[in-house]
Amino acid sequence: MREGRIPHAQLFTGISGIGKLQLALAYAQYLNCPHRTDEDSCGTCPTCLQYQHLQHPDLHFVFPIVKTDAGDTCNDFLEPWRKIILENGYFDLDDWHEALGVETKQSMIYEKESGEILHKLSLKAYGEGYKVMIIWQPEKMNADCANKLLKILEEPAEKTVFLLVSEHPEKLLATIQSRVQTIRIPRLETEKIAEALQRKGIDAAKATDIARIANGSYLAALKKADETEENQQELRDFIALFRDAYTVGVLQDPQKKYESLKRLRQWSLDIADSKVGRERQKHFLQYAQQQVRENYIRNLAQPELNYQLEAERAFSTKFAPFIHDGNVEAIMNQLDLAERQIEQNGNAKMIFLDLCLQMIVLIKKPKK
Ligand SMILES: [Zn+2]
């Protein structure tokens, strides 16, 4: 920008939760602030304020929607859109679906939107600055819509800037990819994420653990911090499963074996309960796979490779030796199989009871 070379179409890419959309917004504001310095926009002029409230007449948004009675183009969903940005800041497609109140994952940018985009960009600019068209998740664009935008991406109108914000640029049509300048946004530094979590009141040790698990995504860190309650339940379920599987499979005391077997049966009924729901069941099975992996890696005695919270580590100190070369692959396969069967609407009671029986067999397998 300092050199006066403004690309007319840029693609900001990177993993979810690193602030790509915020960066696009800040860039758009910078582009238009009449008082900008070499470093930043002024942040206080009327233009900056309009941008910060996402209300500038030359700032336009395109994002995936689901056609409902509420409407069929992005214009009809601007209110929840502004709200999720201003209130959440960091969010992903799932959060957006939740904000829209839709359960389906079939949101998209429909063909009709291309007409809206062309119309908006044909209008006279409100101010002296640039017209900015931010397209969030352009990979959700229907092919007809994408094709209709090729020409304007190739030769945009004067003082018009397209900012595409994508997590999956490989899913964009090649014809779109070739018309945009790609900017890769890196993962955030773990220390920065930990600092941000601490500013939200999370204590330093926990913030560091969560930041490491989040692997560069602030959104993942926020979700992990939020999940703590659910996490504790999943950890309790994980411990219950393997403790009783161990008792039945390895210990000799028949009475204890009997009691553990009964508990496992109840465990499978509880987790299979329809009130728990398939999403939570799947999430638990993913969590269990993650923990099995962490326990296995723990045996390598390289703590920097471990990504666990304190309570998880506490269980692992005793449990990790039982996950080894002789059984880790088979255990992971069984958990993965159960996850897929749940996904395919299999009978949850049978799936979880079978999982218990498999764990009894696998936990006593000898090391290789
Ligand atoms: Zn300003």
Image: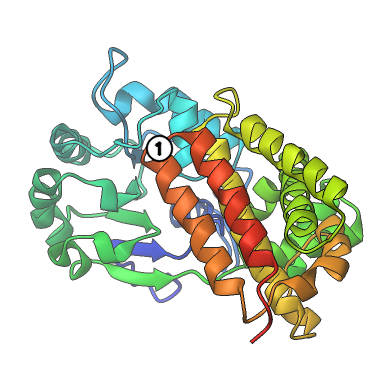
Q: What element carries label 1?
A: loop
Residue at left 72%, top 49%?
A: 241
x and y percent of residue 346 in the render?
40, 37
Of the 4 image quadrants, the one containing the N terminus is bottom left
Query: Is residue 168 shown to the viewer in this render?
Result: yes
x and y percent of residue 154 in the render?
13, 62
The residue nearer to you, when weighing 268 against 125, is 268
The residue nearer to you, when weighing 340 against 127, is 340
The residue nearer to you, when weighing 12 against 28, is 12
Question: Crowding at label 1, few (<14), some or many (≥20) Cα neighbours within 10 Å?
Answer: some
Q: Is residue 338 above or below residue 75?
A: below
- Is 134 on the left-hand or right-hand side of 232? left
Question: Residue furthest toward the top?
Answer: 69
Q: In this view, does 117 lie above or below 239?
A: above
- Is 312 on the left-hand or right-hand side of 193? right
Of the 4 image quadrants, the one containing the C terminus is bottom right
Q: Is residue 336 above or below residue 273?
A: below
- Is 299 on the left-hand or right-hand side of 173? right
Residue 251 picture quarter: bottom right
The residue that mark 1 highlights is 346
**Which color scheme is applied?**
rainbow
